[in-house]
Amino acid sequence: MNFIQEGFAQAVTLLVNFDPATYSAISATLRASSLAMAASLALGIPLGYLLGFLDFRLKKQVRIVVNTLLSLPTVFIGLVIYALLTRKGPLGEMGLLFSIPGIAIGQVILALPIVVALTATAVEAADSKLRLTLMSLGANRRQIAAGTLWEVRLGILAAAVTATGRVLTEVGISLMVGGNIKWHTRTITTAIALETSKGEFGMGIALGLVLLLIALAVNMFLAGLRRRS
Amino acid sequence: MEELSTMRNLMFMLFIGMLLLGSGIFLAAAKGQAAEDGKELLMATTTSTDDTGLLDYLMPSFTSQTGIAIRWIATGTGKALKLGENCDVDVLLVHAPQAEIDFINKGFGTTRKEIMYNDFVLIGPSEDPAGIKGKKLPEALQAIKSAGSIFISRGDNSGTHKKEQALWKTANVVTPEQEPWYKQSGQGMLATITMAAELQGYTLTDRGTYITYESAAESKPALVIVVEGDPDLLNQYSVIPVNPVHCPSVKSMKAQAFSDWMAGGEAQKLIGEFKLLGKQLFTPNASR
């Protein structure tokens, strides 16, 4: 009954023996989350930057909406995307249900508010003094914008780290939209849910540890970026 | 500035207040939960008995006749057996005969009492791409394989998954694994049927869940029964009380009372009368 100990041993065995099912799940997880993160950073950084930098009439209200979206439950996102992608749904023709890009679409909805909100917060925090300094140095509007962006790079990195953590570990979207199909859309988290329902608790813990190792690798990479900048 | 800090203090106190309130509610709920845990019989069962509404129909009679309150966790047979092994439940209602016998041989359960059966059906798209309608079971499975038609498997060690694996063996087909037409959902029965409908594939299901799916789809279900009535498709349910020698904490008297009641005349009659959308689902077969 010592699942945790059993899990540690099994995690090592799975990785060292190149267990094909485990590596298939790792690959599905990485493919879905890289797609999702690429899209959410490409969309989220400019949006968050604008939200933090510009002053407009409904700014406060928009911030509240974005912050509320941080609480979107993943099963709910999964359900909505499922409803859009099902054969009977409006986007059913695209054949994205039970596919990795389908999962990534849902994960973008999960990650986007995080990237937007944290980027905007970083820009706002840097803004007031920085803008004055840059202006006193004689910068024009465009240079101010570029200068601010450079100054908040660590804040944006933090947004990326947080969003990556959420995307890597979510299970609701992967299960609903991906369908947990073995060798295709089974990610590490849906595999954990499955092993648990099979009563293979040790295997579930092993996969959880594998996921933590991946998160560690991703964060070491991001920390490397931080040091360089 | 003065005003701002007063405001901040106020907010902070409000936050602390909410935190205290929240933990108070949590503690009270946990306490209530613990008090209830002592009394109720806890059962692990398969999704089919819960999804079809059988337990909701049957359990009020059990409680009113024996005075025993019961709660259940509906899950795959694999997890249900594991919950029993880990002493997390008192009694099991499951359908995987070989795994059940192993469970008892390992000393985790006391006795296995057969209660009722329903049957499995092979369902698929009404267009029937593999042309198996009305075929015998082994030929039907061989035809799916040679046509390369999509087949969705539960792939979750559930009773249904174990049955499917046995059926491939009976049909002399090596159980598929990585073949592109063979997809393992790793999910519950209804989710798997929904997936089969989306992908226009075949799947094996218990009849009860199929009727549930059929009724939810109203007049036009995407999937229809293509093979049924084979003796190999029988699905036997049994009750097993968890062994008090292995798990001293289980409520073994109540678990035994449940097992006896389920095999008794009253429950057997009720099971036979249970209908889902006008169709009988389970056939009682307890030996008295």
Image (spheres, rainbow, N blue to C red):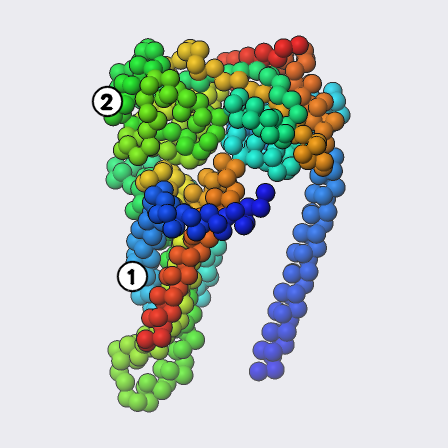
Residue ID at (41%, 67%): A158
SS state under label 1: helix
In the picture, which quadrant includes the C terminus of chain B? top right
Viewer-side residue, A17 vs A43: A17
Residues marked 2 and 1, same chain: no
SS state under label 2: helix
Residue type for callout 2: Ala
- The subunit carrying tag 2 is B
Residue B147 is labelled as 2
Residue A42 is labelled as 1
Residue ID at (52%, 42%): A201
Q: In this view of the protein, can residue A177 be seen by the observer?
A: no
The correct choice, above or below, for B201 with respect to A95 in the image is: above
Give the distance between the C-alpha atoms of the residues marked 2 and 1, in whole angstroms.
44 Å
Residue type for callout 1: Ala
- The subunit carrying tag 1 is A
The correct choice, above or below, for B60 with respect to B7 in the image is: above
Q: Quadrant of residue B196?
A: top left
Residue A217 x, y percent position in the rendering: 38, 61
In the picture, which quadrant includes the N terminus of chain B? bottom right
Q: Residue furthest left?
A: B147
Residue A43 x, y percent position in the rendering: 30, 60
Viewer-side residue, A18 vs B223: A18
Q: Residues within 10 Å of mark 1 (few under 14, many from 20)?
A: few
- Indicate left or right for B52 with B67 as reference: left
Residue ID at (68%, 14%): B264
Circles 2 and 1: CB atoms closer than 8 Å: no
Viewer-nearest of discs 2 and 1? 2
Q: In this view of the protein, can residue B173 be seen by the observer?
A: yes
Q: Residues within 10 Å of mark 2 (few under 14, many from 20)?
A: few
Q: Quadrant of residue A85?
A: top left
